[in-house]
Image (cartoon, rainbow, N blue to C red):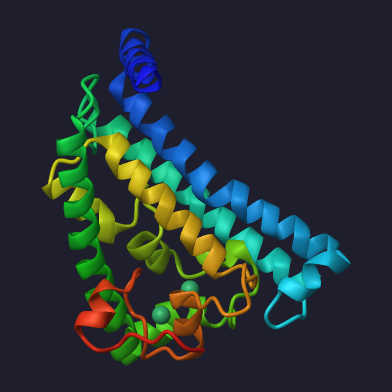
């Protein structure tokens, strides 16, 4: 309770000192650092050092080559920075308008839950439809989405953002994946709700591309998608269960 109160005070005090555009840009970058870059770098360092204790956790047990690792990290970082620059340019151009709802008033728990569920469900629907289109349209697959699938199966955590820039903006970050950005704007969700959702999605993406299982029998849905691309087309299982494209097996 006290934490929430302190957080509310800290969040409000930001608005006395900084512009909402700057608060939005910084919040988005921070959520990508926490959800993508930091966990991605942790997996990257483990893959680079290849310690013996990590080997049993890798499935399959081979570590990626240094060349492949470098390729993944370079492309993912380039995609991330491009998103940051474009977001900054948009905020400068649209000033004083912001992309998200950036208010000093925090939503109530009820409002936040409603916004979270709404953005999640709409986003999942859009993710499923556009991801399916990427696989079923030959031109889109060959020119764009096949680049991400060309990494193979779960080479390293940062490969989650390896791919064509269009693919990146659609599914990963622009500052938010378009499939999540659109519902966030339509439902006028508070930036903190949106970024909380985004951070969890990024973290689960990094883990499912990492090549590590925390338990032998765990199956990450997106990992299975890389092994059988007609399955698990959603970011989570919701749409795949509804449309019979879900698989829990490798
Ligand atoms: Zn993937
Ligand atoms: Zn795919």
Please tell me which residue is depicted at 32% across the width and 18% down the height of the picture. Answer: 8
Residue at 36% over, 25% down: 23
Question: Which quarter of the picture shows residue 63?
Answer: bottom right
Residue 41, can we see it? Answer: yes
Q: Position of residue 243 (x, y in %)?
A: 20, 85
Tally the marks.
0
Question: Which residue: 63% across, 78% down?
Answer: 216
Q: From this viewpoint, which residue is outermost toward the right?
A: 52
Question: In the rendered image, which quarter contains the N terminus?
Answer: top left
> Where is ligand 2, by quadrant?
bottom left
Q: Is residue 64 visible?
A: no
Name the residue nearer the viewer: 160 or 164.
160
* Residue most extreme to the top: 16
Viewer-proximal residue, 196 or 2? 2
Q: Position of residue 137 (x, y in %)?
A: 28, 89
Quarter-of-image position of residue 21: top left
User: Residue 173, percent across and down?
Assistant: 40, 54
Between residue 4 and residue 200, name the one nearer to us: 4
Towards the viewer: 109 or 156:
109
User: Relative to 194, is 67 above or below?
Assistant: below
Q: Is residue 146 above or below residue 10?
A: below
Residue 173 in the image: above or below residue 248: above
Spot the residue most to the front: 1
């Amino acid at each position: 309770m006290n934490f929430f109160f302190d957080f509310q005070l800290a969040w409000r005090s930001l608005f006395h000192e900084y512009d909402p555009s700057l608060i939005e840009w910084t919040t988005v970058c921070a959520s990508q650092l926490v959800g993508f870059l930091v966990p991605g770098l942790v997996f990257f360092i483990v893959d680079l050092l290849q310690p013996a204790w990590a080997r049993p956790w890798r499935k399959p047990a081979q570590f990626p080559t240094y060349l492949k690792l470098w390729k993944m990290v370079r492309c993912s970082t380039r995609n991330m920075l491009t998103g940051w620059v474009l977001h900054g340019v948009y905020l400068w151009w649209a000033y004083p308008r912001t992309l998200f709802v950036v208010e000093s008033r925090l939503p109530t728990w009820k409002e936040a839950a409603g916004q979270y569920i709404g953005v999640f469900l709409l986003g999942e629907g859009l993710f499923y439809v556009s991801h399916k289109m990427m696989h079923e349209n030959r031109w889109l697959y060959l020119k764009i989405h096949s680049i991400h699938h060309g990494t193979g199966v779960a080479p390293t955590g940062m490969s989650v953002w390896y791919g064509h820039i269009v693919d990146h903006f659609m599914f990963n970050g622009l500052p938010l994946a378009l499939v999540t950005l659109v519902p966030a704007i339509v439902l006028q969700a508070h930036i903190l709700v949106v970024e909380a959702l985004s951070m969890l999605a990024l973290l689960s993406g990094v883990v499912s591309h990492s090549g590590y299982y925390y338990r032998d029998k765990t199956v990450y849905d997106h990992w299975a998608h890389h092994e059988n691309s007609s399955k698990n087309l959603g970011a989570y299982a919701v749409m795949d269960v509804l449309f019979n494209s879900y698989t829990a097996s490798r």
